[in-house]
Image (tube, rainbow, N blue to C red):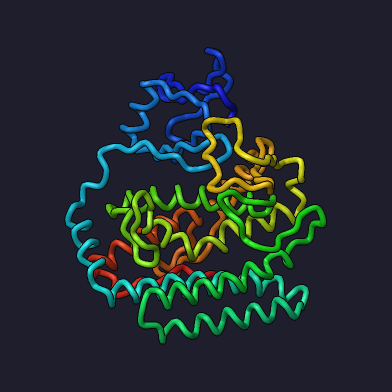
Amino acid sequence: MEQGLTLAVNGETFNIERAGVCIDRVRMVDVDQVLVFGDITLTPAAIAVLLRSDTDTVFLTARGRYRGRLLGPGGRNIQRRIAQFARARDERWVLDVARRIVAGKIANQRTLLLRFQREHRREDLAEAIGAMRRAAAALSGTHTLDEVRGLEGHASAAYFGVLGRCLRNPEFSFTERTRRPPRDPVNALLSFGYTLLLTTMEAAVLRAGLDPMLGTLHVAEYGRASLALDLIEEFRPLIVDALALRLVNRRELRREDFEEFIGEPDDPLVEPTETASPQPAVWLGESGRRVFFRAWGRRLRETHLYEPRGQTLTFEQILRQQAYHFARVVEGVDPAYVPFVSR
């Protein structure tokens, strides 16, 4: 993340250099993913090693907006991609998968709210939980993707409408979900976490031999990783939202760990906001990103029961398993997509 650094290679290690001087070393075998924020240089030797080892390498702006990734030859399983595109023409199959994805997302959102409701017994939380239960029950009666998306929208509105009630740190508040750009620290945390979650899932989708651009719930659009977006829906509340609440409520982050500006930032590597606004845009500062990354690594390594295999796996492993599960559903090996739902 430190601007101006260089990633180089020395034998079986990556060297992190500042002005030609090595300041840190990491063994290649310990590296699963490289996230490059802003003005960072990768030497040709480092690029060659990353491509040869098929190490997922993601480029982001200095403040964490996704820019692209380093890709090798790509998925070689062309038959799987052909099957994926054939499935996309089956409207009943697409609708069924979309319903299941939304059902999983709503279930995990409700689980998060229920944990706080058991502790604090708030009427507004109870009302939101009830509204989400009704939206989930109505999914089985949907006949179009627009109806599914509408119910997902209703459930999310109820969820985000009370998510701020789960905050226990008076320095922070949350009233609504804002993005592109986020308008407050909690939204900045959510946006940053969702970006990292998406990069992790897109890598899993590519390794599974699928096309990340062709999903079910999300419309196929130019440049949009629709399938990766589909598959992170059930994990947003479990991994990102829960982590954001934990960091705020445990006071691991402070307001000074965030930066805000009005108008466009000076950093040319930061993506401009979509519309000019007098409201400040809020981003995690460098100190905040360091705190978040340490917590992010711990979160991905947390273990949970993965019922399809009857094993306890880390969240990172479960993300990969769900991508391969989707691939097996595409090929007809698994009968239907089953979202990962926390118990």
How many numbered marks have been drawn onto this rendered protein structure?
A: 0
Identify the residue at image location x=40%, y=69%.
308
Identify the residue at image location x=76%, y=73%.
119
Q: Is residue 309 left or right of residue 214?
A: right
Q: Residue 99: give x, y in percent of width and height.
A: 40, 75
Q: Residue 321: give x, y in percent of width and height.
A: 39, 59
Q: Is residue 178 left or right of residue 248?
A: left
Q: Is residue 295 left or right of residue 15?
A: right
Identify the residue at image location x=48%, y=63%.
233
**Residue 169: quadrant of the picture:** bottom right
The quadrant of the rendering that contains the N terminus is: top right
Along the viewing direction, whichever of 336 and 88 lies nearer the viewer: 88
Q: Residue 136: give x, y in percent of width and height.
A: 50, 80
Along the viewing direction, whichever of 135 and 266 lies nearer the viewer: 266
Q: Residue 167: give x, y in percent of width and height.
A: 74, 61
The quadrant of the rendering that contains the C terminus is: bottom right
**Furthest residue to the top?**
20
Along the viewing direction, whichever of 53 and 11 lies nearer the viewer: 53
Query: Measured along the vertical axis of the image, is residue 142 above or below residue 86?
Result: below
Along the viewing direction, whichever of 263 and 303 lies nearer the viewer: 263
Identify the residue at image location x=52%, y=12%.
20
**Residue 165: quadrant of the picture:** bottom right
Query: Measured along the vertical axis of the image, is residue 2 above or below residue 336?
Result: above
